[in-house]
Image (cartoon, rainbow, N blue to C red):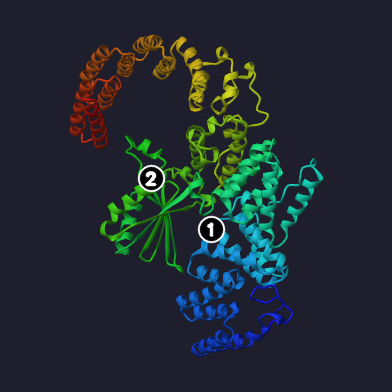
Amino acid sequence: MPLDAYSSCPCGSGKKFKWCCQPIHVDIDKAFQQEAAGQTEAALRSMEQVTVDHPANPEAWGRKAELLYNAGRPEDAENALQKAFDLNPTYPFGFLLRGSFRRAEGEIPGALLLFRKAAEHYDPEAKGLLAQIYTLIFDCEMKLNHPVAARAAAQLALRYNPTAEDLRQGVDSVFGEKNPNLIAAARREYKFLPPPSTGSGERRAAWNAALPGTGPGKLTDAVRAFEILTRSDPSDAAAWYNLALTQAWLGNSVAALESLDQYVALEPDENRAAEAWTLAEVLRLGQGMEDHADTVEHSITLPLKNPQAFVDALGKLDQEGLLAGVRVNQEEGVLTGVVLEKPGPALTPELEAKQSPKLGAYLAMQGDIVRLWNTSKQDLEQVQQLLRERAGSAISESYPARGPAKFFDVLSECLIFPRLGSEAELEPRMRAHLEKFFEEAWIHRPLKSLGQVPPIDAGTPVLRKKLRGVIRFLEECAGLTKFPYDFDRLRRKLGLLEGAAAPAPEAVAGPDIGAMGTPELASLAVDALSDAQLDQAFVAALKLDARELAGKFAQTMTTRPARADRPDRYPQFNHLVNLALAQGDSTAALDHLNSGEKDDCEHNEGRRRNDFELRRGQILAKSGALDQAGDVFDRLIARVPTELKVRGAAAEAMLAGKQPGKALAYAEAGLAEARKQNHRDSEGYFMELAGAAKKQGG
């Protein structure tokens, strides 16, 4: 279709076609018509003549490069395109063309960079081409898991071409509520914050100059404007937010995170700050952000020498109950499924029925290629080892990789596949598992999103705001997979649940003590608690790492008569011992130990005697009474000679006390016993202890 003489020239110069490249496009069009007719060589000769006749016009070289690439001569195409850039380093069509080359080769990040350069250098009046470029940017950003940048690009494409109904419908589909792959924070249409109501006339003028950057093709101008605003007034929270948003729209997620960090620190409203940090969590899941993310996807590609042997191995795993959700797409020839983590041995059939194997890895097989992936690198590698053991020589060399996790995979480490008698058992089993995961494990995990601080320790105002955002992000991810967990339980545990009043002492029989956070636990009237409630409070405080509070509950528990149904009170006495040691009071620690050992003999038939004695030896060694400690360890080893942990504890105690000779003797005796038991892990442990003792001079 002939170009309008008064339309913007496709070369991107900003001139009208009539006064720019129209004279040479007659011959260029002739060459492409010849190509369309299958006359490739004739087309190339025609294009060669165009470059001879117009050697100083970059459009001639650019179109020659396009024709050469279409003819399957990519190296020659790159050489021709380079000549165009030599003539005009900002040749807009050249960036678009080179980006198309990279995209065809699957090099998406490089293509995206070139498309953005093309959008930057094309004249704003070249609306048709800019709509095409931003559609390409949208496609690339989605492939890189950058939904915020992708939506911004799609909106720009629609502004340049409002009649593109296919694009409009595609955007509505991708960012609509029915998309099962994107959380709300990734689908949302983000908007600039208004300028502060206070401020000089000069600053308001600067804001007004920045805000038009929301128009087509002006995002880079907006970035520069907001950078100036934040430099001139670093306390302007709205300017930092708008800078972050513009950087995110441009796909510059690292810079956007830094700007959001500034905004969250300045924003006094915790909910608005949390919303911004939820956006930060979305950005962390993009490609190129793996070093900044708490969750990444680890994958292993396995070429197969014998696909049928591998399928046979999968069949055996299925028989063992280690394969789940197997599906075969006949049209695409793809087999998918889940390899489960091999559970430990169960002592009885009843205990085996209660096991809930975890996700080992997702699996996809197409032809002679298998791909495994999981957010847990350790679990993934264990599955690879299991498959190699079962499939043997059917598997060739492996190729590991790392990339962004999908939103619905963020909580895949929570997945369990319980062995159930009925479907009705699934939800309560899953809910209990999730409560244990979030409230006992996750809260103690250092997070990059919190500056490597665990959620339980996020006590500063800024970290509280960020923690709210992290939990909101997890809640939205859990919503994709319909996980049956109430995240208000987690907020309550972490003191983030607004309006969570402490229970009145007279109503203490009703509340779920195990779900309480530290402030609520601290407000409990200890003397009014039943024995069972005290036990719950003690466990809850330990899970929250509120050690002093747990000590208060333990002290009360140990002064009450022992419960007939729960006579073992070693955990409480041991906690009091540890608190005393933390305060440097070994005498008090031994007093608690003696009281605990006496209580165990009187009420628990002395079942914990060895545990108490082991702690005695450790305490004596730590206090410097190494000879007495040695006597305790020796008596205990004589009593339980096969208990490897006792020998290890004795060696460690002597190492800490600078007694290398004694440490070496314990380590070597432990090594011999470990070899006798064929306990590989313990062998390595005792070898390390022996090596350390020798370095000390043992």
Name the residue beneath numbered marker 2.
378
For the question of whether residue 476 can be seen, the reply is no
Q: CA distance from mark 1 to mark 2?
A: 25 Å
- SS for dot 1: loop
Which residue is rendered at x = 63% and y = 52% of the image?
247
Which residue is rendered at x = 56% and y = 39% of the image?
485
Q: Is residue 181 above or below residue 545?
A: below
Q: Please tell me whether mark 1 or mark 2 is closer to you in this view.
A: 1
Q: Is residue 67 above or below residue 205?
A: below
Q: Amino acid at mark 1?
A: Leu
Q: Residues within 10 Å of mark 1 (few under 14, many from 20)?
A: many
Instruction: Give the numbered dot on residue 325.
Output: none
Q: Amino acid at mark 2?
A: Gln
| Whole-percent x, y for residue 651 in the image | 26, 24
| Left or right: where 638 falls relative to 118 | left
Q: Residues within 10 Å of mark 2 (few under 14, many from 20)?
A: few
For the question of whether residue 193 can be seen, the reply is yes
Quadrant of res 162: bottom right
| Left or right: where 132 falls relative to 303 | right
- Quadrant location, the N terminus: bottom right
| Whole-percent x, y for residue 258 in the image | 59, 45
| Left or right: where 333 falls relative to 146 | left
- Quadrant location, the C terminus: top left
- SS for dot 2: helix
Instruction: Give the numbered dot on residue 144.
Output: 1
Decide which of tag 1 and tag 2 comes sooner along the chain: 1
